[in-house]
C-alpha cells in the first residue's frame, strides 16, 4: 500500500507477520521515537534510531533487508521513510498508525526498563 504522499506503508498486522516470518534476515523494525518513548512501550527486536539524530545515523541502517519504520502514530515514521527512500534505500515502508495502532491491535509489546542491547541495530 502507498499513502497519498507516495510513501510505501503497511498496517500493523502485516508488519508483525512479516517480522515473525523473517528471522534474522527478515524485516527490521526501525523505531524513530525518542528514548523515553521507547522505554515506555516498544516492539521487541526493534532498533531505536530516534528522529532527533536520524539523519546522522541513517547510514548505519542495513540496505540488505526490508526496513519497517515505526513511531507513535505514523507521522514521524512516514517522514523517516521518505528520507530513506530519497537517500537510496529501496525496501522501506512506514508502519501505519505506529505503536498506538500496534497496541490497539493487541500485538505484543514490552514495557519498563530497557535491557542492555535492546534497541541496538543488528551487527554483521
Image: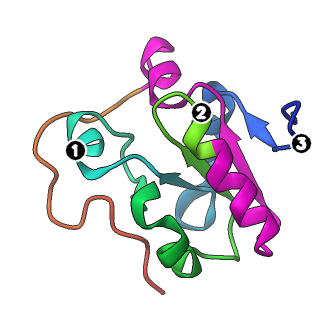
- Where is residue 54 drawn, in percent x and y? 49, 65
Mark drawn on residue 16: none
Q: Earlier in the sequence, mark 3 or mark 2?
A: 3
Whole-Å distance between the Cαs marked 1 and 3? 30 Å
According to the picture, the residue beneath numbered tag 3 turns out to be 6
User: Pointer 3: residues within 10 angstroms few (<14), some, or many (20+)?
Assistant: few
Quadrant of the image occupied by residue 78: top right
The spot of residue 33 in percent (x, y) is: 40, 46
Judge from the rendering whether residue 73 lies leftward or rightward of residue 115; answer left or right. Answer: right
> In the current view of this chain or complex, which residue is farthest to the front?
52
Residue 76 vertical position relative to residue 81 in the rendered view, above or below: above
Write down the quadrant of residue 48 in the picture: bottom left
Residue at 16% x, 51% y: name it. 114
- Residue drawn at point x = 32 percent, y = 59 percent: 119
Label placed on residue 74: 2
Label 1 vs label 2: CA separation?
Answer: 17 Å
Q: Does the magenta portion include 118? A: no
Q: Nearer the viewer, residue 99 or 64?
A: 99
Q: Which residue lies under the disc numbered 1?
A: 36
* Placement of 24 over or under 32, stated as above or below: below
Amino acid at each position: 500500500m502507498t499513502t497519498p504522499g507516495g510513501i510505501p506503508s503497511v498496517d500493523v498486522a502485516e508488519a508483525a507477520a512479516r517480522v515473525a516470518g523473517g528471522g534474522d534476515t527478515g524485516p527490521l523494525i526501525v523505531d524513530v521515537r525518542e528514548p523515553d518513548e521507547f522505554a515506555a512501550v516498544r516492539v521487541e527486536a526493534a532498533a531505536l534510531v530516534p528522529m532527533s539524530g536520524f539523519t546522522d545515523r541513517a547510514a548505519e541502517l542495513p540496505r540488505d533487508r526490508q526496513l519497517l519504520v515505526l513511531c507513535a502514530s505514523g507521522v514521524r515514521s512516514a517522514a523517516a521513510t521518505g528520507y530513506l527512500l530519497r537517500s537510496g534505500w529501496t525496501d522501506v515502508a512506514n508502519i501505519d498508525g505506529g505503536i498506538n495502532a500496534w497496541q490497539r491491535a493487541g500485538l505484543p509489546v514490552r514495557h519498563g526498563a530497557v535491557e542492555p542491547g535492546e534497541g541496538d541495530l543488528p551487527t554483521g
